[in-house]
Amino acid sequence: MDAIIARDLTKTFHTIARRPGFVGGLKSLVAPARIAKTAVDGVSFSVREGELLALLGPNGAGKSTTIKMLTGILVPTSGEVRVAGLEPHRDRERNARTIGAVFGQRTQLWWDLPARDSLAILRDIFDVEAEEYRRRLAEFDDLLGLSEFWDSRIRHLSLGQRVRCDLAAALIHDPKIVFLDEPTIGMDVVVKEQVREFLRHQVEQRGRTVVLTTHDMTEVNRLAERIVLINHGRLFFDGSLTELRRQFGATWQVHVTLADAPADVAVPGLRVLRRDGPRVAFGPGDGATSTHEALRLIIERYAITDLAIEENDLEDVMREAYLHREQMTA
Amino acid sequence: MGLVWRITRLNFRAVLEYRAEFMLKVAVGAAWQISVVVFATVLLTRFPGMGGWATSDVLLLASMRLLSHGLYVLLLGRVTWTHIVVQLGQIDAFMLRPMPVYRQVQLAFFNVNAVGDLLVAASLFVGAVLVVDVDWTPARIAYLVVALVGGVLAEGAIGTALGSAALHAPATAYWSMWLDELMTAFGNYPLHILPGLVRDAFTFVLPLAFVAYLPAAVLTGHLETLAVPGWLAVASPLIGLLAYLASRLLWKRSLRAYKGYGGT
Ligand SMILES: Nc1ncnc2c1ncn2[C@@H]1O[C@H](COP(=O)(O)OP(=O)(O)OP(=O)(O)O)[C@@H](O)[C@H]1O
Ligand SMILES: [Mg+2]
């Protein structure tokens, strides 16, 4: 069952272009030049129930805009959204009961109230039963350590503390589907780990569907079953982490030192990246070859005295993917 | 309704916790109103019988306007802060809750100034009702109450219309401030002392006349001094209601076209 369906989702913002200089400013006032910016451009994907999907892409890719359309905050310019069978912007209040959302950069809580009061208000707005509420609050406190600071006003909390309160607030009504836009922003390593555990718990134990954006690749590595990549508003990858590595991350290098230095070094299926006397650096050739495979091929042909394998971490894979996309659009 | 009350109570408790700030805000609200009253008193004693109205009649008009303004600030006034709510990104959060966004804007915080406003306005109002030469029959008392509600709604209509604009362009806040000044400056006097064009603008463009001037004219029997037909003056509360409903429709349309405040 698909919890979320996005079909050809597009959002175009119209803004007024500023012309440079004073005269230009006056011109803009008299005859404003409207420019259209397509932040999300024909994005289609779906998320199964109980799946955790990481929506990734560089700054300005259109991740937040996509999430805002999925949550009903923005009305799509065109295309279709279904979240738990509802059209979020048409059925806003009903949709609000089935989803929860955290926008890490901004709080949804009452600035001047202690976090606990905010949570109590949300309990009332969402008609959460008192007993349920107590149980959930205890669970969130247990996993996120909220009671240390939940009697302080939101405006006095640190960023990491505040986002943890926001997480609890987004889940207090037990939503089936959760949208998290940079939920670990500003958190220290310990808290980040705590939040990751919390999210894993929400998916695995509570069966929630989660859509997550983040710039933290460790998080992606630990949490994401599936990844959707967008850049310049367009989707260009949808698959598992392994597939992503296979497609963009086959940029390993195998460094060897040959026992004797033949004039010509060549291994079918591999590429020689650098050669410096007996020291040779191999990279993958045309086909996607694993490092094990490459090693076997090299050893079959040459005697080696030294060996080092350099595999790209996820950040490199991601950089490769983003750049690849830039070239495709260029 | 219980929910609205509970949230308001929490908001109120939050401002109470900053005791000094609370007292300062109440005091400034009161000081603001008192300065308006002092100014009005000076005007009235220098020019008795303003526009053919007795001083006590003008006093009733001024106090009706101040009281409905105070009630407006208390009950609906947060809508004039829409630009702040937009800039803080709170509208986004409001859209994620099963409650009308308009109501959430109204519940965003407790406006302490309103308390001071209301204290002064209410005392002035009681004084004016006692002093004015009106035979307070039950019908007139009922009309007075309805007129006050109408005044709240008329001002609410102006605030909501501006709030709807602020959803898209927070800079409209400057217009709200200017209009507020304008209404404070002219709202407390018989508008027919102004040039015809200005008076008409305050009647048909900005519905200021319907807030207190026209209903006060009805109560004090000054229908002949008006530039509008008597029935229209009597219908002021209804006009306030209609204007408010229209402004709520405008809000609804405006919210549908909400495009967020910048990217995050
Ligand atoms: N309200 C708006 N008006 C005009 N342009 C906007 C608006 N909101 C977003 N944009 C533009 O749309 C594009 C996508 O923005 P979005 O916030 O979705 O990016 P993002 O992928 O979330 O980036 P980041 O990783 O930096 O958070 C950006 O170029 C941004 O400038
Ligand atoms: Mg973003």
Image: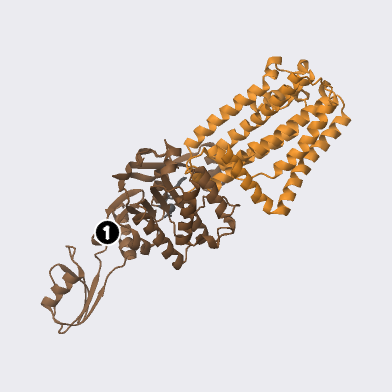
Residue A321 or residue A90, whichever sits in front: A90
Left/right of residue B39 with respect to residue A57 in the rendered view: right
Q: Residue at x 15, y 75 (%)?
A: A298
The colour assigned to chain A within the rendered structure: brown
Check the picture and name the quadrant holding the N terminus of chain B: top right
The answer to which image quadrant residue A98 occupies is top left
Residue A248 or residue A49, whichever sits in front: A49
Total number of numbered discs in the rendering: 1
Query: How many residues crowd around disc 1 within 10 Å: few (fewer than 14), some, or many (20 or more)?
Result: many
Q: Residue A320 location in percent, x, y?
A: 30, 61
The colour assigned to chain B within the rendered structure: orange
Left/right of residue B247 with respect to residue A33 in the rendered view: right
CB of mark 1 near ligand 1 (< 8 Å): no
Instruction: Answer above or below: position of B45 versus B109.
Output: above
The residue singled out by tag 1 in the image is: A244
Q: Residue at x 51, y 33 (%)?
A: B252
Q: Residue at x 85, y 34 (%)?
A: B41
Q: Residue B230 location in percent, x, y?
A: 71, 15
Q: Is residue B229 visible?
A: no
Residue B94 or residue A322, whichever sits in front: B94
Element marked by disc 1:
helix
Q: Amino acid at mark 1?
A: Leu
Q: Residue B73 location in percent, x, y?
A: 67, 38
> In the orientation shown, which residue stands out farthest toward the front?
A131
The answer to which image quadrant residue B247 occupies is top right
Residue A54 or residue A268, whichever sits in front: A54
Instruction: Answer above or below: position of A330 versus B243.
Output: below
Left/right of residue A85 with respect to residue A297 in the rendered view: right
